[in-house]
Amino acid sequence: MAWVGLTEDQAKAQGIKVKKGLFPWTASGRAIANGRDEGVTKLLFDDSPEAHGHGKILGGGMVGTHAGDMIGEIALAIEMGADAVDIGKTIHPHPTLGESIGMAAEVAHGSCTDLPPAKK
């Protein structure tokens, strides 16, 4: 397990509205091939009205095998002030566990085609 940046509780305490992007590793080709699909990648973005739908990443985490080896990409995205589109457009090799970061960003943005649409 690995986390970097703000948690949901910390953002809430600071009065920041968050948008979540969750990507279950049960949809990751690499996790399935490894027989270790019990993980998840979660990204948090600023969803305040001032962000106009393009809020910067606030924090993120991963639960699963080698999570600590991949958390650096999320730390870099925070440092760069990336939004969900920036992360989603970043090239992620396939099949890798790290591509779940891009997929979680796409879930938050609403452009992920690797999962069925979320129910509203």
Image (cartoon, rainbow, N blue to C red):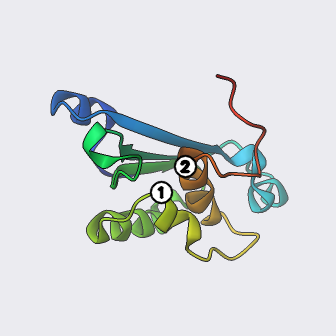
Q: Crowding at label 1, few (<14), some or many (≥20) Cα neighbours within 10 Å?
A: many
Q: Crowding at label 2, few (<14), some or many (≥20) Cα neighbours within 10 Å?
A: many
Specify the amino acid type for callout 2. Answer: His
Which residue is located at x 44 percent, y 49 percent?
Answer: 61
| Horizontal arrangement in the rendering, residue 115 relative to residue 103 (left or right) | right
Among the two numbered marks 2 and 1 on one chain, the one whose residue lies closer to the N terminus: 1
| Horizontal arrangement in the rendering, residue 1 relative to residue 91 (left or right) | left
| Horizontal arrangement in the rendering, residue 82 relative to residue 109 (left or right) | left
Expressed as whole percent of the image width and height from the top left, the position of residue 87 reads 50, 65
Q: Secondary structure at mark 1?
A: helix
The quarter of the rendered structure image containing the C terminus is: top right
User: Which of these two is toward me, 93 or 20?
Assistant: 20
Expressed as whole percent of the image width and height from the top left, the position of residue 4 reads 33, 54
Which residue is located at x 64 percent, y 65 percent?
Answer: 99
Which residue bears the numbered disc 1? 84
Expressed as whole percent of the image width and height from the top left, the position of residue 60 reads 41, 50
Marks 2 and 1: CB-CB under 8 Å? yes
Specify the amino acid type for callout 1. Answer: Ala
Which residue bears the numbered disc 2? 109
Using the rendered image of the protein, determine whether residue 40 is visible from the camera's viewpoint. Answer: no
Question: In this view, which residue lies farthest toward the top?
Answer: 120
User: Which of these two is toward me, 14 or 65?
Assistant: 14
Question: In this view, which residue lies farthest toward the left?
Answer: 14
- In space, the residues marked 2 and 1 are separated at their CA atoms by 6 Å
Expressed as whole percent of the image width and height from the top left, the position of residue 86 reads 47, 67
The quadrant in which residue 33 appears is bottom right
Q: Secondary structure at mark 2?
A: helix
